[in-house]
Image (cartoon, rainbow, N blue to C red):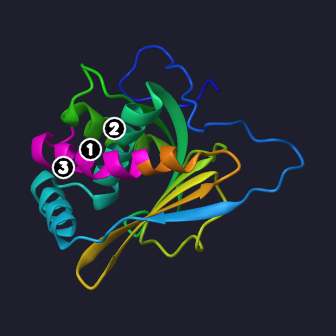
Amino acid sequence: MADEVRPLVTTVAAPLEVFDRPEVAGNAPRFEILKTAPTSEFADEVDGAAEWLGVPVAEILLAALARALGRTRGEGEVAVEVAADSLPAPRAVWLICSDALPMGPTEMLQGAHTALAAAAGRAAIPCEVLLDVASGKHGSGGDHGLELHVYRAAGALHLDWHYDATRFDAYSVEEMAEQFPLALIEITSDAATPL
């Protein structure tokens, strides 16, 4: 679509195939949830980085999601709906997923920052991936083929992965859930403030 802004690339990136299998018409989705062990260390790390970098937590989490998808699903671009308390309404963004240079932590955070800024006021694009950062703007899951719900409880950061088991093998989601905290630490430890 001609009016869509894609950050950090001069040409359109290849679409990223997030799912193990395509959606089959007539087959009802079957949603499952993978919950990761909550940690207060991640909550402190994300809060400290958000304050130091001067960005909303949602941008850091979006950059980490891009890195985790790049590591587990490959290089490319995916449409992601982002819902967060820091946003007045959910936004649909084009996210560049990568695990290769020159896309270091700073570039990943800049990409998330630019994507969210470019999405303001833009018509929604169809998204099969959701990042919901404690927004309360989505229910318990099931509107997208893959949803990452991030919320705080008892001082810890909880990560719940909701996924359509007709399109994902469980191990694929487990791999994403394992890579996400590593990507998060990389972004919070090594990224510079976006422009």
**Which residue is at the front of the view, 148 or 47?**
148
Give the residue type that dot 3 points to. Answer: Ile
| Labelled pair 2, 3 in contact (Cβ < 8 Å) | no
**Residue 117: x, y in percent?**
40, 45
Q: Residue 37: within the magenta?
A: no
Residue 185 numbered mark, or none: 3
Q: Quadrant of the C terminus?
A: top left
Q: CA distance from mark 3 to mark 1?
A: 5 Å
The 10 Å Cα crowd at callout 2, few under 14, some 14 to 19, many 20 or more, is: many
**Which residue is at the front of the view, 18 or 193?**
18
Q: At x 46% / y 71%, what residue is drawn?
A: 135
Whether residue 73 is situated above or below residue 166 in the rendered picture: above
Give the residue type that dot 2 points to. Answer: Arg
Which residue sits furthest bottom?
A: 154
Kindly tell me whether residue 114 is visible in this rendering: no
Sequence-first tag of 2 and 1: 2
134 with respect to 24 (left or right): left
- Residue that badge 1 annotates: 183
Secondary structure state at the residue bearing disc 3: helix
Which residue sits furthest top?
A: 11
55 with respect to 79 (left or right): left
Query: Which quadrant would residue 25 be assigned to in this image?
Result: top right
Sequence-first tag of 2 and 3: 2
| Labelled pair 3, 1 in contact (Cβ < 8 Å) | yes
Whether residue 113 is situated above or below residue 10 in the rendered picture: below
Q: Residue 177: within the magenta?
A: yes
Secondary structure state at the residue bearing disc 2: helix
Give the residue type that dot 1 points to. Answer: Ala
Secondary structure state at the residue bearing disc 1: helix
- The magenta region covers 175-195
- Residue that badge 2 annotates: 67
